[in-house]
Amino acid sequence: MDTLMPRRSIIWFLTGSGLVNTVVFSFILLSLTFILGHGLGAWHFPLALALSLFLNYFAARYFMPGEFGAPFIRSSLIILSIIIISILIAGQFYDISSDGQMYHMESAIQMKAGWNPFERELRHDFNQAVWLNHYGKGVEDPQATIYAFTNRLETTKATNFILLAASFCLTMAFLLRLNRFSDRKSILFSILMALNPVTFYQLLNTYVDGQLCSFLLCFMAAAGLLYFDANRYFLILLASILIIVINIKFTAIVFAGIFTFGMLGVFLIAKRRQSFRRTLIVSILATGFAIGVVGFFPYMINIIRYHDIFYPGLPMLKSEAAKFTAPRIIHKNQLSKFFISFFSHTDNLHLSVTKDPVIRSKIPFSFNKTDIFNASKPYVVYMAGMGPFFSGICISAILIFGYWFWRLKKRQTAWPVIIMAGTILFSVLIISEAWYARYVPQLWFFPLILLITSETEQGLGIQRIRKILYILMLVDISFCFASFPYVFYKTVQIKYELQQLKASGQTIPVEFTYFTSNRARFIEYEIPFHEVSIPDSNAVFMSSSSTKMIPPLVMPDLPKSLVLRTGDRIVNKFHLSGSRF
């Protein structure tokens, strides 16, 4: 045990690891339940929480023998509060994302309805069946356990907030253990690391990339703690993170492997033999368990049935990526696409409207209304998705780090940081679609690690530049706040639509198109409906999707010129119960 670990660091660790393990244990419990031939129940999430707190009890006794009671109770109350608040906040917003409504939430719905993905596949003609049947469920399984517990579909997004809080807490635990920065700076660095743009703008939907980024930050914090002390509780946390990261998406397997090799490389070059040996063993065991047991679906099933662990295969994944790649860059190599995006204005490109949009390059730190407008959108931004100032921040961070390294007397002490930063950069550039920010959210950590490392350089000019860069990173993050009012507005609009449909007392003809998860909203509002095929000319659309309806009391002489723009779509306006919206 490392007796130098400060008490505050221990409490932050207990809180962060308790939150992570609650999510991971819910995934493991549900996977084991599926293996045993049973289904999802309301008990999975509460049991996962109880097991997490149970583990924390022994961790508190290990780190603070004789005085563990108060810290354990304090951290447990914080964990419970964060989980409750996360569920309440998530339940107040509707997921208006396309992928979220098409198949991420559909996974939770199907599991709650009795689907066991370890036993059978959904029909091939079922909406989005290829993704439901062959993609890992490291995000969807924990979300499904929350859905089963609360019986409200939108609360599944609570895992976003839980893991955001966990990544902040574990980063604080590491920085306080490092004992190099003031409390104020530790809080600032933890906020900057945890609140990256991809995680932030995915808080209100069920995309998986934001959670993946939170887990990768947790991984780095766990690796940092293991650098000082390879005790069993840090190792358990590392194993938990690896188990679930490997099961989030196919690229996450690559990230898990690269980050693990980077961590082992740091331990090896720093001659942390015990940390190297123990983390190597735990990493191997966790990977085997992640793929061979809880990841039997989809990985082993894909191998057994289709002879390809990445079935439906990389060619199909590339063809899907091509659908949202601008024609101007689609035939360029991955490095060219990355740097074109990196030095572009922040832009969503509007590929559904413009077939060949213009990609405008820019000088770092410059910006215009295109950057400001798109950086605040509540959906994934294609070009320069980390924010308008990110390219300039990265270049400045590299220069400052280079200056710090040049002035460093014992340059061998910088190798762990260089390996860590290089690991992040390599994990980004190896991905073919690295130009698309949500596919490589860990890129946000690269300049931060360089800047935080250079904090020992106390020259007045360098200090001022660093402060400006931190402020600009906060500005990049702050653009994401603007999406919350828009999502709230759409939520109010959806609730109004559903309330009016329920008040009609009639059975609603509806065609859910690709957004079949919307039927859960009808069920939660107790709106009777029957599914039919509806021509666009006779249909009205829900504000959040392309779900078609023939609502009651529609004005038959409604002028076709009346339209309501929702996002990038134009849909017909209609009247319900004499009210217009």
Image: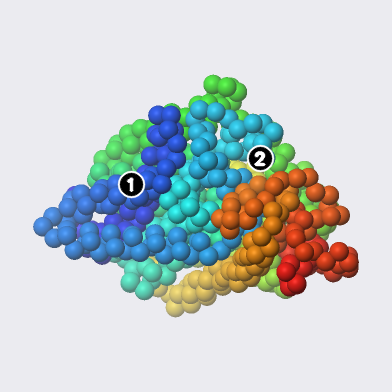
Residue at 56% x, 55% y is 524
Residue at 62% x, 69% y is 492
The residue that disc 1 covers is 47
Residue 318, can we see it?
yes
Crowding at label 1, few (<14), some or many (≥20) Cα neighbours within 10 Å?
some
Name the image quarter holding the C terminus: bottom right
Please state which amino acid type lies under the numbered disc 2.
Gln
Quarter residue 201 falls in = bottom right
Q: Secondary structure at mark 2?
A: loop
Q: Residue 517: x percent and y percent?
A: 62, 49
Q: Residue 381: x percent and y percent?
A: 66, 59
Query: Compared with residue 381, is residue 284 higher up or lower down, i.e. above or below?
Result: above
Please state which amino acid type lies under the numbered disc 1.
Leu
Quarter residue 364 falls in = bottom right
The residue that disc 2 covers is 128
Residue at 53% x, 45% y is 108
